[in-house]
Image: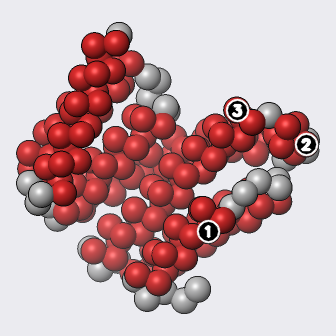
Amino acid sequence: MENCVQLLTYLFLIHRFLFANQRQTEALVYAQRAYEIASQIYPSDHANCLNLLIDISVIYADLNVFTESQRILEQVIQTSQTKYQFFIDNYSNDNELLKSNVSKQREMHEIVYTLIHSILQLAVVNVMSKKLEFVNQLLLQADHIINQIDQLGLKVSTHRKLINDFKMEHHFQI
């Protein structure tokens, strides 16, 4: 198990390095291999697996393979949304329980981050593929999630900053 985690870390770092150096095709191979190993170590809805899928989708988008990027992001959003909804269903009536449990707050933050990140990445793919009509829907979805988290009394500034940064970068109204 320890060797698998080390290999996963190694593959992750290599794919990030390759991507940063404009070697997307090679980065894709390493990211996919990292995902295969992560899937053997963690459940498919674990943040490590989901974030690797987001990385893979980013590489596909950079290679102009928008349909595959979109398919992967929709899969990540669906998985993250399911986990997110579980938290909302279980803690919306008793947010004091969530506020008093630091590990659950951390888990919720991780889920929301992955969900918002994947929604915004899908918005980027839609901008890149000139499907602007879907971008506003995605931004509304992200805002709705942030508002729900805010109602639970959890910190939303990091998540809201992601959304606002996207809007500023792509010239959408804040």
Question: Mark 1: which amino acid?
Answer: Arg
Asked if labels 1 and 2 touch by Cβ distance under 8 angstroms, the answer is no
Dividing the image into 4 quarters, which one contains the C terminus?
bottom right
Question: Mark 3: which amino acid?
Answer: Ser
How many C-alpha atoms fall within 10 Å of the one at disc 1: few (<14), some, or many (≥20)? some
Residue 76 vertical position relative to residue 65 in the rendered view, above or below: above
Q: Rounded to the nearest whole Å, what is the CA distance between mark 3 and mark 2?
A: 14 Å
How many C-alpha atoms fall within 10 Å of the one at disc 2: few (<14), some, or many (≥20)? few
Q: Horizontal and vertical percent for residue 32? A: 22, 36
Q: Horizontal and vertical percent for residue 29? A: 13, 39
- Name the residue carrying label 2: 96
Say which residue appears at 45% left-offset and 55% top-offset: 118
How many C-alpha atoms fall within 10 Å of the one at disc 3: few (<14), some, or many (≥20)? few
Say which residue appears at 46% left-offset and 75% top-offset: 166
| For marks 3 and 1 on the same chain, the one whose residue lies earlier in the sequence | 3
Residue 91 vertical position relative to residue 153 in the rendered view, above or below: above
Helix, strand or loop under label 1: helix
Residue 140 vertical position relative to residue 15 in the rendered view, above or below: below
| For marks 2 and 1 on the same chain, the one whose residue lies earlier in the sequence | 2
Helix, strand or loop under label 2: helix
Q: Please give left or right for residue 110 compared with residue 105 in the image.
A: left
**Residue 65, can we see it?**
no
Q: Which mark is residue 103?
A: 3
Q: Looking at the image, which residue sits at the far top?
A: 1
Residue 63 found in image quarter: bottom left
Q: Please give left or right for residue 52 compared with residue 110 in the image.
A: left
Say which residue appears at 28% left-offset and 22% top-offset: 6
Q: Horizontal and vertical percent for residue 148? A: 75, 59
Dividing the image into 4 quarters, which one contains the N terminus?
top left
Q: Which mark is residue 160?
A: 1
Q: Rounded to the nearest whole Å, what is the CA distance between mark 2 and mark 1?
A: 22 Å
